Image (cartoon, rainbow, N blue to C red):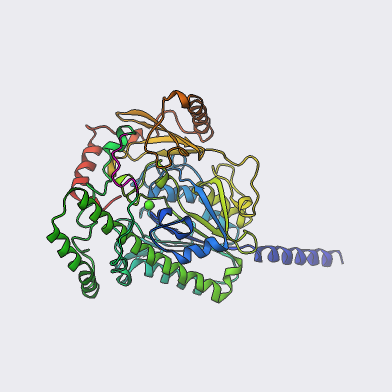
Amino acid sequence: MRQFLFWSLLAVAAALSNAAHAARPNILFIFTDDHAYQSIGAYGSQINKTPNIDRLAREGMLFQRCYVPNSICGPIRAVIQTGKYSHVNGFLVNGNKFDGAQQTFPKLLQRVGYQTAVIGKWHLGEHMPPQGFDYAEVLIGQGPYYNPPMLRNGKRVKHVGYTTDIITDLALKWLRERESEEPFMLMYQHKAPHRNWQPSPKHLTMYDDVTIPEPPTLFDTYAGRGTPARTQDMSIAKTMTDSDLKLVAPRNLTAAQRKLWDAAYEPKNRAFRAAQLQGRELVQWKYQRYIKDYLRCIASVDDNIGRVLRYLDDTGLAANTVVVYSSDQGFYLGEHGWFDKRWMYEESLRTPLIVRWPQVTKAGSVNKQIVSPLDFAETFLELAEADIPGDMQGRSLVPLLRGETPADWRKSFYYHYYEYPGWHDVRRHYGVTNGRYKLIRFYEPDIDEWELYDLKADPHELKSVYGEPKYKSVQAALLADLARLRKQYGVPEKDPAAALGGGKDNPTSARIRKKNEKGREKKD
Ligand code: CA
């Protein structure tokens, strides 16, 4: 009798546990590369429409202040995997090798019974397959926009077609074929809209008949800032190559793809060559060419997200799936005359974050708390009812998604960029922002300059007020906060990037400069 009772209780406990587990949501993480919030309808875009991403915002929560810890591709992916700053997870700059043996959130989800997959861009190196995934089909390095070779669980496979469509096809295939008993976590990660912005055959002539408005700072002179803004190499005027500007066609197209490509670009290129534009007019032409191609790539992303959302609707999965939309960082769409990212200035510090969690998150809500990709791992673990390891450095967003803000939620944020010498010549820097003010220190190997911005008085960050008497107390408070955060996160006094070398005589620097001159589009 006692034994019978024991087994009965065990059966009841198991049933309860299964019921609890059955309620755990699926997690669909939709991730793009370099998608600026300025080009998302829900964030107020004046230059394009993104109906499917906007739908997620309408049905979920949009975060206004999602700050990246290090505004560059590979490092943010490592931050997301680990929930730790770059100096802790060891991935400081593109080109570092990610240590996949360390603790990552997909491994922890597997342990609590989630099926996990990553499909699309990985960009944490091919030295080892992605760890912690039941299925991985990833681009090799940056991957091309057309006809991408991919690694399917480590084995090379070749696809023909447009990469944004292919990644979506593969994600839908995995969703259809997965075992359905356990919840899933799928990282569905696009290459688009990364440089050099090659549109799909469907969107090659989109925007041909319109002029996209220019940002007010397209012709920035950098007068109110220090050396770094003036010595960068990421301007639309000077840095863009013929390949960026589609004055030469991609080399890896099939004959049919090439025919469509040439039909779209050749007439426009002929007109451009004949016009012999100079100076300001030339920059304006380059801006139009750049932004239209960029937005065409976004149009493909948005269409494909629509396909996935429809699949969730049609299969009934939508009700118990948390859908997250984010990008690895923000991007300059001509602001300050730039493209690319890296800086702690707003356009590249802030990244889009939209979360739809049916029945929990209030539809159409907007959150202004400071959040970060540093928080994603912790959030996914809490959604899966798994323990959050004490060594992770972010914080679960679940309370915010429930509409509650913990009293001790962060009020300021630490940022640190390391990749100098490197592509686009953006100096190493770190800093702190509280959303109202921002303090930045540019440092090493041959510079030490501070900048301070009043984001209310100067939202475009055109004039540093560092050292101005009016801001004495603000500056002192930010300096103290910066020291506090560096201590809290264990940032070493000795620059963690020192081993990378630096300075004009450094061979790394010389090598990169040479590469920069040869072909800038390849490695950023
Ligand atoms: Ca990126």
Magenta region: which residues?
Answer: 216-223
Image check: 65 left or right of 502?
A: right
**Which is nearer the eye, 15 or 189?**
189
Image check: 369 left or right of 227?
A: right
x 24%, y 34%: residue? 506
x 66%, y 64%: residue? 23
**Which is nearer the eye, 328 or 261?**
261
| Image quadrant in which you'd find residue 380 | bottom right
**Which is nearer the eye, 131 or 259?**
259
**Which is nearer the eye, 171 or 336?**
336
Identify whether 462 is placed above or below 274.
Answer: above
| Image quadrant in which you'd find residue 264 | bottom left
x 17%, y 60%: residue? 272
Image spot of residue 342 (x, y percent): 36, 44
Image spot of residue 220 (x, y percent): 30, 42
Image spot of residue 152 (x, y percent): 39, 65
Q: Quadrant of the N terminus?
A: bottom right
Can you see residue 99?
no
Magenta span dominant secondary structure: loop
| Image quadrant in which you'd find residue 211 | bottom left
Can you see residue 368?
yes
